[in-house]
Image (cartoon, coloured by chain):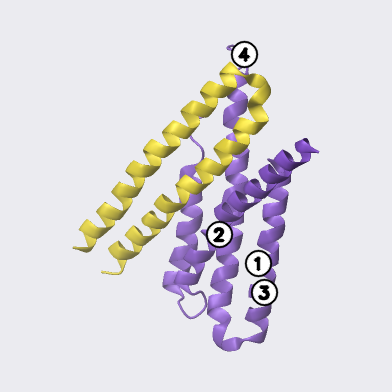
Amino acid sequence: MSVLAAAIAVGLGAIGAGIGNGMIVSKTVEGIARQPEQKAALQTTMFIGAGIVEVVPIVGVVIGFLAFFSA
Amino acid sequence: MDKMMKSATRWMLCLLVPTLIAYAALPQWRSVALGLALGLLASAMNAFLLQRRVVMSTESAVQQEGTRTRRKGLGFGNRIATVLLLAMFGYRYPDIINLPAALVGSMVMPFLILVAAFIHTVKENNSGKG
């Protein structure tokens, strides 16, 4: 069961972070390519979004490792 | 982004000071205080790494085709490895580092950045109105 718990924690976290980060980076690069003068504002928005999105999978991976190794 | 990071770092240091005081003054809370302090430092390191990788990846979007340096990813593995190392220390030495405190500390910096960005945006919008 602990292997299943670790797999669910890591896998669902990776799915969410992958979709979210992919959308953030693609839209930011698209916006910078269209309006290079807005680069600083778009960088800031991307930084905030990527930082918030990546918190959940990082903690999910840690919890997954703990569930896997503490069994 | 630099101004926002500076204010978020200042707030992180303001949170770090009570944890260090608690580490020195409260022996029974020493592991919790050390876990929080190390978690805060790990999250600050993750935030600085993310800032550097965001700048690098967006710089490559505006470079010319021939001079473009290829950047793959935002260093997500490095940030996971940092927090995982801290968690493994907390798991191995539970009497020195409290693991839940370390995990909570490692989640703080992105929310500080979010609050700093909100305040920065409100200030910028208000300053334009006169």
Q: Contact (CB < 8 A) between labels 1 and 3?
A: yes
Task: Tell which of B112 and A6 is nearer to you.
Answer: B112
Q: Secondary structure at mark 2?
A: helix
- Asked if both marks, 1 and 4, belong to the same chain, the answer given is yes
Identify the residue under disc 2. Answer: B108
Identify the residue under disc 1. Answer: B15
Position of residue A10 relative to residue A70, above or below, is above
> How far separated are the C-alphas under marks 1 and 4?
43 Å
Identify the residue under disc 4. Answer: B64
Which percent across, then down, holds residue B2? 71, 42
Q: Chain of mark 3?
A: B
Q: Nearer the viewer, mark 4 or mark 2?
A: 2
> Which amino acid is tagged 4?
Gln
> Which amino acid is tagged 3?
Pro
Residue B72 can be seen in this image: no
Q: Residue at x 58, y 49 (%)?
A: B114
Quadrant of the image containing the N terminus of chain B: top right
Which percent across, then down, holds residue B24? 67, 82
Mark 2 Cα shell of 10 Å, populated few (<14), some (14-19), many (≥20): many
- Asked if both marks, 1 and 3, belong to the same chain, the answer given is yes
Q: Secondary structure at mark 1?
A: helix
Q: Contact (CB < 8 A) between labels 1 and 2?
A: yes
Tint applied to chain B in the drawing: purple
> How far separated are the C-alphas under marks 3 and 2?
15 Å
- Asked if both marks, 3 and 2, belong to the same chain, the answer given is yes
